Image: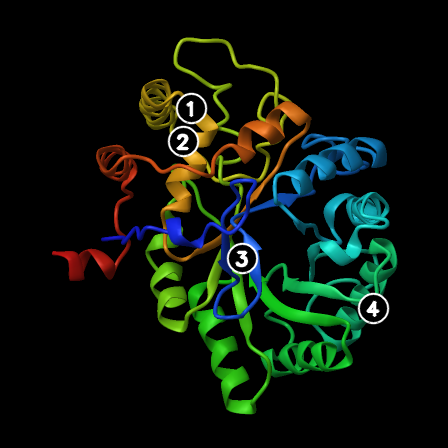
Amino acid sequence: MSISYPNFAENKLSEKNMEYRNLGKSGLKVPVLSYGTGTFGGTNEFFGRWGKTDVKEASGLIAICLERGVNFFDTANVYSQGDSEAILGAALSGKRQDCIISTKGTFQMGKAPNDKGASRFHLINALDASLQRLQTDYIDLYIMHGFDANTPIEETLRTLDRMINSGKVRYIGCSNFAAWQLMKSLTVSEKLNLEKYIVYQGYYSLIGRDYEQELMPLIKDQELGLMVWSPLGWGRLTGKIKRNEPMGEGRIKSGGDIGSPPVDNEFLYNVVDVLKRIATEMDKSIPQVAINWLLQNETVSSIVIGARNEKQLIDNLDSVGWSLAPHHMEELNTLTQPNLLYPHWVGER
């Protein structure tokens, strides 16, 4: 599948070398890098493997982000069962007016039958709880964290539409939907004259390019934007995993790859070998090359980066302000090209 990689150089608006793009078809400008707060809290077993950033540490990391032009912060109510939102809200105290916040709802937040899903009942409760934890009276971008097959799409979209009309939400998006689920949602919104999803938040990396086959053509056609999550392949492209070397301390070694898609070891080593060589040639780091490859994709509005500490954060922030050479792009594209799913291989053939 061919991918076009336009030159975004004219879109650089910040003196701090940050690039801004429109969030999907909306007029909202966002930095191409946003800061993900899945490491904030770490107060349960699952998210504890990602990180355990407290309010003090979060405040320092956010200060670095703002200094570098990153004012877009992504969280979710399910991250550490609300603790990530609470820490982000506390760390943004006095800075809220200068920031863009996205959070998510849908996943399990309690033991009761209605403590999950995309029903009107659950979403209204979930939004109000998120607003309280984030210490704000509005959410810039509210994202459905997953598709709820047990709730009519119309019910979900009418609820989100009313949230926007109430002023509690400004834009809406979705995450982890199949292409048909996203397209059906957009069709229902158009038919009923309801607010539409403007952005899709999805997994995309050099070692996870499934997005390109079904979702990317849809997003291009419908003029949505992509917010990339896990651009470093669940921590596999941080440079801590290399051929014939012991694994470095980090998310993968601590068990943070639980729930991730499997990746063949030889394929991973081959990709890292090339990333390491390109990084050396360009005087960059392996993560910077992997993130910059994503930035060349025209459907990307923002890439959600994560960091446990200041060193990781600063390294990731240095992924912008430059571009991979065309021959590097071609090499990485060819090396990581996935086998096409049916019926796409028919069309290609």
Query: Could you say whether the residue bearing mark 4 is in a helix, strand or loop?
Result: helix
Mark closer to the chain start, 2 or 4:
4
Q: Which residue is mark 1?
A: 284
Mark closer to the chain start, 3 or 1:
3
Mark closer to the chain start, 3 or 2:
3
Q: Which residue is mark 2?
A: 289
Horizontal side of residue 122 vs 281, given as left or right: right
Mark closer to the chain start, 4 or 3:
4
Q: Which residue is mark 4?
A: 125
Residue found at x 27% / y 35%: 325
Three-letter amino acid code of the residue under disc 1: Lys
Question: Looking at this rendering, what residue extends furthest in the top direction?
Answer: 245
Three-letter amino acid code of the residue under disc 3: Asn
Within 10 Å of disc 3 (Cα), the crowding (few <14, some 14-19, many 20+) is: some
Horizontal side of residue 38 vs 210, given as left or right: right
Report the front residue among 165 and 242.
Answer: 165
Three-letter amino acid code of the residue under disc 2: Val
Determine contact: label 2, label 4, CB under 8 Å.
no
Mark closer to the chain start, 1 or 2:
1
Horizontal side of residue 63 vs 282, given as left or right: right
Q: Position of residue 194 (x, y in %)?
A: 59, 85
Determine contact: label 1, label 2, CB under 8 Å.
yes
Residue found at x 62% / y 31%: 313
Disc 1 or disc 2, which is closer to the eye? 1
Mark closer to the chain start, 1 or 4:
4
Query: Could you say whether the residue bearing mark 1 is in a helix, strand or loop?
Result: loop
Q: Which residue is mark 3?
A: 176
Q: Position of residue 98 (x, y in %)?
A: 73, 54
Q: Is residue 93 above or below residue 138?
A: above
